[in-house]
Image (tube, rainbow, N blue to C red):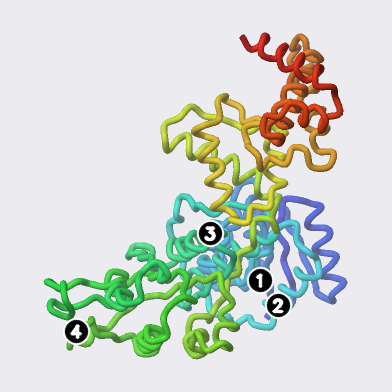
Amino acid sequence: MAEEIWVVDDDRGVRFVLVEALRDAGLTVREFGEAGAVRAALHDGRPALLLTDVRMPGEDGLSLLNELQQQGIGPVIVMSAFTDVATTAAAYRAGAVDYLAKPFDLDQAVEAVQRALASVASPTLAAAQQLAPNHSLLGESAPMREVFRLIGRVAASDLNVLITGETGTGKELVARALHEESARRDKAFVALNTAAIPSELLESELFGHEAGAFTGATRRVVGRFEQAEGGTLFLDEIGDMPLILQTRLLRVLAGGEFYRVGGRELIRGNVRIVAATHQDLAARVAAGQFRADLMHRLDVVRIELPSLRSRRSDIPLLAQHFLASTAQELKLPPKRFSRPALKLVAQRDFPGNVRELENLCRRLAVIAPGSEILPGDLGAGSDVARGGEWTDILREWVTQALADGEADIHARAREALDQTLLQVALEVSEGHRQNAAQALGVGRNTLTRKLGASRQRRS
């Protein structure tokens, strides 16, 4: 087998630093600027390994990857600055052994090459199929790029997956992406929140029941396992499942067989299990609240979702997406965030994570009065007065107003400042003017006069 590494990328700078790093690692490297040059070079030899960019002028990297796989040439590592679920999944389905998200660490890139060379016999994934058109998962931060990479790598397999992360991080979206990018995509995706079903009904929900199995069971009911036959069953909040049902689930995972409640017919199932929890399963095992053998059955591959506060750079992208999608869904006039408002949103901690951000955007899409979301529309949680950020917002507002040629900027700004100070001080002092004036450091007569002037302007 040839010992030459081929690097294909239309970006000369990327090629240069990557090629030099590989050569420093003792590898022989040949570089190409486009896929056509690679095809011509194949007449004279084959690479030991090829690294290719995805988006290049002319033929893209995935098309080249498909052709190389058909010729039995590989392994291939794909590189791209566009790291999303569909692209990574397509790369792995087409036979890529690894996926490097740009910008990547050169040491990690060299390690990926050495790892691929050491495992040339790695099995090739299925040939590329039609991509799912859209995914609800969004993000450009490093933590989300790693999540996309894992989804792409694992989706084509039938391995059980455990998704962990705080409440509201989007665990069901990951489960759906795993299903949509798998060979099971044409079968059912069935979701069940095990914490939302009373324990006495959960067994029937999972496995179904026969007529007469219990009081009120007047007919046979098919459970979630049968509904998901050939597809994917997503078990959310698996950490809350009662121990007795954990035992039954373990038997299904071990043997692929189960009985309906009250039934005698042994049913064989072909279902991929994706489970999720916000809890520490290892801690629950130690406390005797979760079976260790079941945890190991579920935790074949783990995908850990980051909290929203640990990927703040994704908040503007998500916020604008949720605002636009809500307007489209509810047939509302489109709205957009002002730069100061978007900055404030990105500074929030969002303990409820992506779900909390989505709810905020849905609320703003409905109740914000103008076509542009302003800091005041964000409510009491906008943190406008934190640190020196309010002056930054004021600076941006003045800059925009001057650029738009607006009139009476100073008077309008002073009026808005006075009105805000007076309103908040009165709210805090429960309408007591003397206390409000004292808190603001102005005389009671001054406060009364400003309130009167503000009312006159409004009227």
Q: Quadrant of the N terminus?
A: bottom right
Of discs 1 and 3, which sits in the foreground? 3
- Label whose residue precedes the other's in the sequence (4 or 2): 2
Q: Which residue is mark 4?
A: 262
Question: Are the two marked residues, 1 and 2, in contact with CB atoms closer than 8 angstroms?
Answer: yes
Question: Are the two marked residues, 3 and 4, in contact with CB atoms closer than 8 angstroms?
Answer: no
Q: Measured from the top left, where is residue 109 in percent x and y?
A: 75, 68
Circle 2 Cα neighbour tier, 10 Å, few/some/many (<14 / 14–19 / ≥20): few
Q: Which residue is mark 3?
A: 170
Q: Is residue 285 above or below residue 332?
A: below
Element under label 1? loop
- Label whose residue precedes the other's in the sequence (3 or 4): 3
For marks 3 and 4, give the CA distance.
36 Å
| Mark 4 residue type | Gly
- Label whose residue precedes the other's in the sequence (3 or 2): 2
Q: Measured from the top left, where is residue 166 in percent x and y?
A: 59, 64
For residue 2, the mark is 2
**Residue 403 visible from this viewpoint:** no
Element under label 3? loop
Q: Which residue is mark 1?
A: 46
For marks 1 and 2, give the CA distance.
7 Å
Q: Measured from the top left, where is residue 362 in percent x and y?
A: 51, 40
| Mark 1 residue type | Arg
